[in-house]
Amino acid sequence: MIDVVLPVLDEAGAIPWVLGRMPAGYRPIVVDNGSADGSAAVAVACGGTVVFEPRRGFGAACFAGLTAASTDVVCFMDCDASLDPRDLPLVADPVAAGEADLVLGARRGGAMPPHARVANRYLARRVVAYTGARVSDIGPMRAARRTDLLGLGLTDRRSGWPLEMVLRAGRAGWRITERAVPYHQRAGRSKVTGTVGGTVRATLDMRRQLVETRRLIRAEEK
């Protein structure tokens, strides 16, 4: 069994499709981050385990799901129908087999907004420069071992969580690799790239992670 953490904020329309395509042996943990559309009830009706995280933030929801998980290998993915759960074995299998410590689903397809693609390429280049890990996408579908993730001591509880995970893992010497996964048009509007405020907050959160990593590198070089 592999637990799959699914952060949710008003995704009632996408949840049935996502949970209905969960592969055998994968248990969905839906983390409701304050939905007003009945997402939690929909998830329960579809057979999902629901965790409530009242503190708003993508990282807060992911951390709540991680602490609620109990399996050795844990996956994360968005619950907006932009990613297909049937692709989860692509990222989970190398971790379960001991071939990698962190596997990222590198999104392929034209569904990502142009400004998001540009920002994502920049972040990936920074990860390469700061850690040496060869990545092309800081994607939301990923897998790692639960105890190892907890040991990273991730502190971001907002939009910087995905980047912080990769930066810390890379600096800790983790074996990081990618698997290409199809990326589809999401259901509804993104809370991050779909709004100016969300985009600005995410940019600032990720910039803080880059600044902190650069500070640590310079401190080690002294």
Image (cartoon, rainbow, N blue to C red):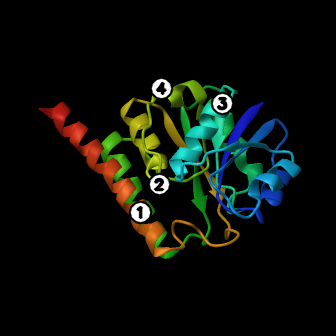
Q: Count neighbours of disc 4 (C-alpha within 10 A) and say few if under 14, some if 14 to 19, many if 20 or more.
A: few
Q: Which residue is mark 2?
A: 159
What is the three-letter code of the residue carrying label 2? Ser
Q: Which residue is mark 1?
A: 201
Which quadrant would the C terminus be assigned to in this image? top left
Q: Which mark is residue 151?
A: 4
Q: From this viewpoint, is residue 21 visible?
A: no
Contact, mark 1 vs mark 2 (Cβ under 8 Å)? yes
Q: Which mark is residue 34?
A: none
What is the three-letter code of the residue carrying label 3? Val
Closer mark to the observer between disc 1 and disc 3 = 1
Q: Count neighbours of disc 1 (C-alpha within 10 A) and say few if under 14, some if 14 to 19, many if 20 or more.
A: some
Camera-side residue: 142 or 201?
201
Q: Which residue is mark 3?
A: 73
| N-terminal-most mark, 3 or 2 | 3
| N-terminal-most mark, 1 or 4 | 4
Question: Residue extending furthest left?
Answer: 222
